[in-house]
Image: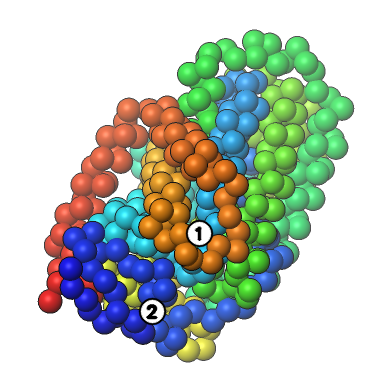
Amino acid sequence: MSEIDVGAAPVRLSRLRIRTVEQLGGTEEEKLPRSLGALDLSLLGIGCIIGTGVFVLTGVAAALYAGPALIVSFILAGTACGLAALVYAELAAMVPVAGSAYTYTSATMGEAAAWMVGWNLILEYAVSAGAVAAGWSGYVTGILGQVGLDVPERLQSVPSEGGLIDLPAVAIALFVTFLLASGVRHGARFNAVLVGVKLCAIFLFLVLAGPKVDPALWHPFAPFGWQGIATGAAIIFFAYIGFDAVATAAEETRDPQRNLPIGILVSLGVCTLAYLAVAAVLTGVVPYTALNVKEPVAFALREIGYGFGAAVVAVGAIAGITTVLLVLIFGQARIFFVMARDGLLPGWLAKIDPRSGAPRTATLITGCAVAFVAGFFPLGAIAELSNIGTLFAFVAVSVGVMVLRRTRPDLNRPFRTPLVWVTGPLAALACLYLMVSLPPATWIRFVVWSAIGAVVYLAYGYRRSPLRPA
C-alpha cells in the first residue's frame, strides 16, 4: 500500500482505491454552500416522491401488472424503500457530502464500485427525469385539449409512437434546468410552492372520489397473480426514489447530522401514506383495465362525473410532476459534480458558479440530456430502465453501511440504522428481488449500459483518478 495527498489529508491506497470518510468532500473551495434546513429537505423529498409515480405510473402498473392489487405493490415497494431509507439515513448523517450512493460506495467498496454506482445513478436521475417530463407532457396536452388548444400529435409523441418529438416534455425540462442553474435557493422556493399545490390536488381527489369507491371493482383483486404484483412493485419503485435525492443535497444542508435523517424519513413516510390512499381509491372508482392512460388520476375523476375536479387535479399533477423533474435534475447535477471533483469525470463539471453557488455547467448538461431523452424515448421503457439503476444503487448502499460498521466502528454516527445486521441484508435482498422482477429486456439494457460504463471508467476515470498509484 502507498499514500497520495488528495485535498486536506492523505488517502491510504489499496487496490480498491477506497477513500476515507474524512477525505470525502474535497477542499473548502470545492464545496457547495450550505443553505437548506430540515423543512427544505422534507419538501425536497416530497417534491420528488409524489409526482409521476402517483399521477402517471399508477395507471400503467394497475392496468398491465397488478390490477387492484396495486396497493400491495405499493406496500412491497414501500417496504423495500423503507429499509433502504434507514440505511441511507445513517450514511447521510455520517457523511454529509454530495453524491449520495456514489459517495457512500466510494468510502466502503472503492473507486471502481463507486463508479459503477454513479454510472447507474444516471439511470436513476437523468433517465427518470426524462420519464417525468414525458408524464408532464401528457397532463399538459390533456388540459390544453380540453380548452380547445390541441397540440399536434406529431409534436407530443416520440418517434416510436409515430410522432416527431414530445415538444412539451423538452420545454419543461429546459425551463427547470435554467431555474436550477440560477441557484439552489431559487429551486427550493419554487419546489415548496408546487409541493403545496400538489398535496391539495391529491386531497381533492381523495375527497371527491373516495365516496364513489365501488368495492366490486376490486375483484378480481390480483388478476395477474403474485408475479404481476411483484412486477408492478418493481415498476412503481420509480415513484419512491425521492428520498435518495435528499441525500444528494447533503453538502448543501445546514446541520446535516440532524436534518438529513429527518428529511429522508419524513418525506418517505408522508408519501407512502398518500400512495396507498390514491391506489386504493383509483382502482375502486374505475376498472383497472381502463387505467393505462397518461393521466389516470384526472381520467378517473372525469369518468365519475367530476370534469372540473379533474381539471383542478390535472393542474396539481402538473405542479407535482414539475417538482419531481426539478429534484431529479438537481440530484443528477450533484452526482456529476462530485464524480468530477473526484477526478473520474472532466474537471469542468465540478466548477461552482460564484454567483449562484450551483454547479452550473453540470446542471445545464444534465438538463439538455433529460430534454433529449424526454423528447425522443417512450415513457414505459424509460421508467423500467431507471428503476433497475436505482435498485442497483440501493443494494450497494445497503451492503456499504454494513461494511463501514466493520471497517470503521470508531466513526461518529448521529443516526444509527436500527438492527443494522437485519435491516441491511433485508434492504439488499428486497431490492434484489425487485430487480429480478423487472422484465428481461430491462436487464439486457442494464447489462449493456453497465458494460459501457466499465469501458468509460477504464478509458478515462481509472487513468486520471488522483488515487492512482504513483
Q: Are marks 1 and 2 in contact (CB under 8 Å)?
A: no
**Residue 344 sits in which quadrant?**
bottom left
Packing grade of label 2 (10 A; few <14, some 14-19, many >=20) is some
Q: Nearer the viewer, residue 465 or 382?
A: 465
Residue 26 circle label: 2
Task: Tell me the kind of residue under disc 1.
Answer: Leu
Q: How is the image coloured?
A: rainbow
Q: Secondary structure at mark 2?
A: loop
Quadrant of the frame with the C terminus: bottom left
Q: Residue at x 47, y 89 (%)?
A: 354
Residue, disc 1: 91
Q: Residue at x 46, y 80 (%)?
A: 31
Residue 155 in the image: above or below residue 360: above
Q: Residue furthest front?
A: 410
Quadrant of the frame with the N terminus: bottom left
Q: Nearer the viewer, residue 451 or 160?
A: 451
Whether residue 390 can be seen here: no
Residue 373 in the image: above or below residue 366: above
Whether residue 95 can be seen here: yes
Across and down, in percent, residue 391 comes to 43, 42
